[in-house]
Amino acid sequence: MKRESGPPPAEARPRSPEPGGPAGTPGGPVRRGPLVIVYLLLAGALLLALHEYSRPGQERTWTLSWDRFTGLVAEEPSPVAWVEVGPEWMIGELKAPRALPVLVGEGKTRDEQVTRFQVARLPGDEELLAKELTARGILVVGRSGEGWGRLLVVWGLSAVLFVGGLFLVMRLFSPSRQVMSFGKSRARVYAERETKVGFGDVAGIEEAKEELQEVVQFLRDPRPYQRVGARIPRGVLLVGPPGTGKTLLARAVAGEASVTFFSMSGSDFVEMFAGVGASRVRDLFEQASKHAPCIVFIDELDALGKVRGVGLSGAHDEREQTLNQLLSEMDGFDPEKGVVILAATNRPEILDPALLRPGRFDRQVVVDRPDVKGREQILRIHAQKVRLSPQVDLAQVAKETPGLVGADLANVVNEAALLAGRKRQEQVEPGDFREAIQRHLVGLERKSRIMSPGEKERIAVHETGHALTALSVPHADPVSRVSIIARGAGALGYTMQMPAEDRHLYSRGELEDRLAVLLGGRGAELLIYGDPSTGASDDLARATELARRMVLEFGMSPLGPLSYGGPRQRYLASPDGGGERREYSEETARLVDEQVAALVRAAEERVTRLLQEREAALRAVAGALVTREVILAEELTALAREHGAPP
Ligand code: ADP
Ligand code: ZN
Ligand code: MG
């Protein structure tokens, strides 16, 4: 059963990908969808109408010879209903359809049912027309030219429709507002004229901000630097765990310097189609040099800059090509121009060394998890957007959230506001924050989960084991609450410990205490039931991991003060342990395993002894936990003391 506590020396907690990533994803096409449909319908209807209008009538118009026409006119009574006279042609209609020979080209004729007809005019036929037609009661309709007016209307409107459509399409495929995209990149490169984010929106990473201050100064006015011949780093790599604000910081630099912000994600470059990635890189730098001074930001550089020469698949080749293009673009870049390249990664250890050479990303800025002060400032920034009750103490919230990064804290504030909104409150109250933190730390509370009484009791014993151990060892973080309410998936119960302060160093004694607390749950189960359960698997995994690091990295075993190649900068390593390498012999490996086992066994013995001495308290607290489900710190201590647990 899961235990929650402050940050162990290093813990890779999977985090959700950052919300509100880089510059505006073009939300346009989605919202404009209905508009397109309406436009298409309207345009279609209009064109149909125009088509109707441009066609003089439904029937086909047949061509008659002059003498056939005059013959018709001369008949008594004339079958011709009306005639429209143009400068070159006459068009007319018969009162009723009639079979007539019509001209079908080259002087040939064919019999057709004719209603509508046309006749070519002859020179000097005006007299005949005027006289004969009117005399026989045939309606003569004058016509100006060959229907130019009508043609003009049709063509004009069609042109207007076409241009309108073109305009609409162009608007659709260019992202909204100040965000523009370009070229073959299919809207994957974003440029923001103003990011509207400044250093004021970033907190808790003061050192990183200070380091980037120089970049801002340079972009604002490069002359003082150029005058003394100072070389501004061409590329700055922001390194840190996910959610600490790397993307935010990059945008803030652009905002502070008020320059254009070009951004692209490393994974965008990596395409299945050969050459696309490389051409995107070229595109990006071409655009950037046109818009200098500006910032080019490459997020998730590791997706692109992995060490080359691994794997044989096409995707790798493609990535390599893209990476080479990036390297050559960076080399060919004139830093005087005022283009600064920023990149972000949470896995610097897997980057191709070529990227880190001088003249490329030769400066690294660490963006680390915020400390308690930083967390408070970050909370303040995000709390500006919500209505806080005066009772809320953000400093206290910061104390209760060790290990959380900026993205988590933004999430906590929002979660608290959501809870307040759901309860129709006027303001966000301290209780909302408490619940939001717990939700964030251990997942959603699931009171509805059905547990058998026996299971519930076992979980209570297990969690009490953790809690009592924590209470009894000298260096454990104080327990703030013990609960057997299931939260999220996986965690059946939990013991929450609050470190009194942010920790950076741990002594051997402290780590041994931590080991004991981790094993306390299983120890209690063994003591009460005589056999362990599967509920301890997570505890065991964490204990073993901790013991291994004590042996391998911290020199806290009889193997002596040697570092056996523990992963460097572990907090940045991927959860799957990417970049780890074993740097010791088989023989040593066996010894290491022995020492790890010895550490864990010693902790187990210690816990067993400790809990045996406190069995009465263990039973009492577990019993209370079964009925009450949650027990807070003071009560826990009181109950333990009451039942004779030595402090
Ligand atoms: P990263 O790129 O390091 O993974 P992001 O910059 O994408 O993290 O952070 C995600 C969001 O979390 C930001 O948009 C911001 O709302 C919040 N955030 C993260 N770090 C900070 C910080 N240091 N100060 C203020 N807000 C932060
Ligand atoms: Zn446990
Ligand atoms: Mg990011």
Image: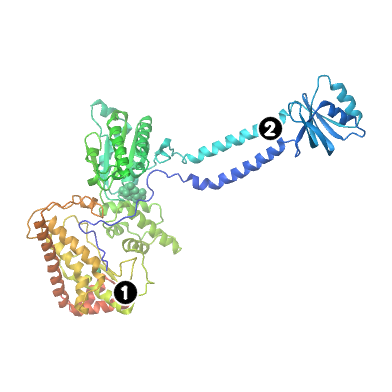
Q: Which residue is mark 2?
A: 153
Neighbor class of circle 1 (other Cα within 10 Å; few <14, some 14-19, many 20+) is some
**Left or right, residue 179 beside residue 595:** right
Q: Is residue 48 above or below residue 479?
A: above
In front: label 1 or label 2? 2
**Residue lying at 33% horizontally and 67% vertically, measured from the top left:** 487
- Give the secondary structure at mark 2: helix
Q: Is residue 425 visible?
A: no
Q: For residue 471, what is the image quadrant?
A: bottom left
- Give the secondary structure at mark 1: loop
**Left or right, residue 526 beside residue 426:** left
- Quarter of the figure with the N terminus: bottom left
Coloration of the structure image: rainbow
Q: Nearer the viewer, residue 142 or 180?
A: 142
**Residue lying at 50% horizontally and 47% vertically, measured from the top left:** 30
Question: Between disc 1 and disc 2, whose residue precedes?
Answer: 2
Which mark, residue 629?
Answer: 1
Q: Amino acid at mark 2?
A: Val
Q: Position of residue 444 (x, y in %)?
A: 36, 65
